[in-house]
Image (cartoon, rainbow, N blue to C red):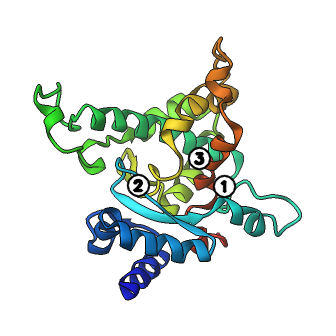
Amino acid sequence: MTEDAQHLIARLLAHQTLKREDKLVKRALADEIFRSEVDTRLKACGMKFIDNVYADYVTLALTRDSESKVFGTKEVWQNNNFGLARDGVALLVVLWSLIILPKRERQEAHQLAEENQNDMFGKDKPLPRAEDTSIGISYRALLADFGDKLGKKTRMDMNLGQLARLGFVERKGDLVLEGPLLDLMMDTDTLKDRIINGALSDIFQIPAPANKNVISGDEEQTDDAISNINNANNVISTEE
């Protein structure tokens, strides 16, 4: 078992992400004793195992306690370790909102991407995979809707290229699709309202909701949830 835990962690460090169908990943998700050993080994290195039932991949990230020692080593605290500028982070949040939130709604409704209506017996089926429910968005539509706010075509192309290299998105012709890391970078349940009504309202001048508690939340919980975007698999990404 010790050898298997070592192999799983080494492969995640080498490949950044692994599919949930991978033999050792499936074991980590189903075998409590094996998962405990993996978590213990990672914690000793200041890292944690990242997965959620809606994503087709798993990855690694820094623990909360390790962030200051990694990101705080320079004079200025880094807001991310991928070299993303503010408009790049904003584009990432926009893509997450446009791709991941609708995908999760389809998964919870047990509705496949190509289905036009819900199957009346769909709830009895297993939760659909991201691959079967995730729908890309048109690059031209993205540019038309957000180009002026996100640096126009040149900056958007540059940031999309960087996000694709990092594994957040994939490009297929005109479509921008979900990449392995896009649904692993933040806690949707904690941040959904905060991102839509908080971060996006600041960037796109959306009026704030009347109930300020919708986006305030527990600061410590919110910081823990959003930290994944800052440190996801930073071990192989700190020098972009």
Give the distance between the C-alpha atoms of the residues marked 1 and 3, in whole angstroms. 19 Å
Q: Could one spot residue 154 in this view of the protein?
A: no
- Count residues near mark 3 (Cα–Cα under 10 Å), then give few for <14, some for 14-19, many for 20+: some
Disc 3 marks a residue whose amino acid type is: Ala
Q: Are marks 2 and 3 in contact (CB under 8 Å)?
A: no
Query: Viewer-nearest of labels 2 and 3?
Result: 3
- Secondary element under disc 1, as helix, strand or loop, is loop
The residue under label 1 is 84
Say if 133 sits above or below 194 in the image.
Answer: below
Percent x, y of residue 192: 52, 33
Q: Quadrant of the N terminus?
A: bottom left
Disc 1 marks a residue whose amino acid type is: Leu
Q: Is residue 117 left or right of residue 215?
A: left
Determine which quarter of the picture holds residue 63: bottom right
Say if 165 sits above or below 147 in the image.
Answer: below
User: What residue lies at 35% left-to-right and 47% top-to-bottom?
Assistant: 54
- Count residues near mark 2 (Cα–Cα under 10 Å), then give few for <14, some for 14-19, many for 20+: some
Number of the label disc, if any, that sits on residue 170: 2
- Count residues near mark 1 (Cα–Cα under 10 Å), then give few for <14, some for 14-19, many for 20+: some
Q: 17 or 53: which is nearer to us?
A: 53
- Secondary element under disc 3, as helix, strand or loop, is helix
Determine which quarter of the picture holds residue 103: top left
The residue under label 3 is 225
- Secondary element under disc 2, as helix, strand or loop, is strand
User: What residue lies at 23% left-to-right and 44% top-to-bottom?
Assistant: 128
Disc 2 marks a residue whose amino acid type is: Glu
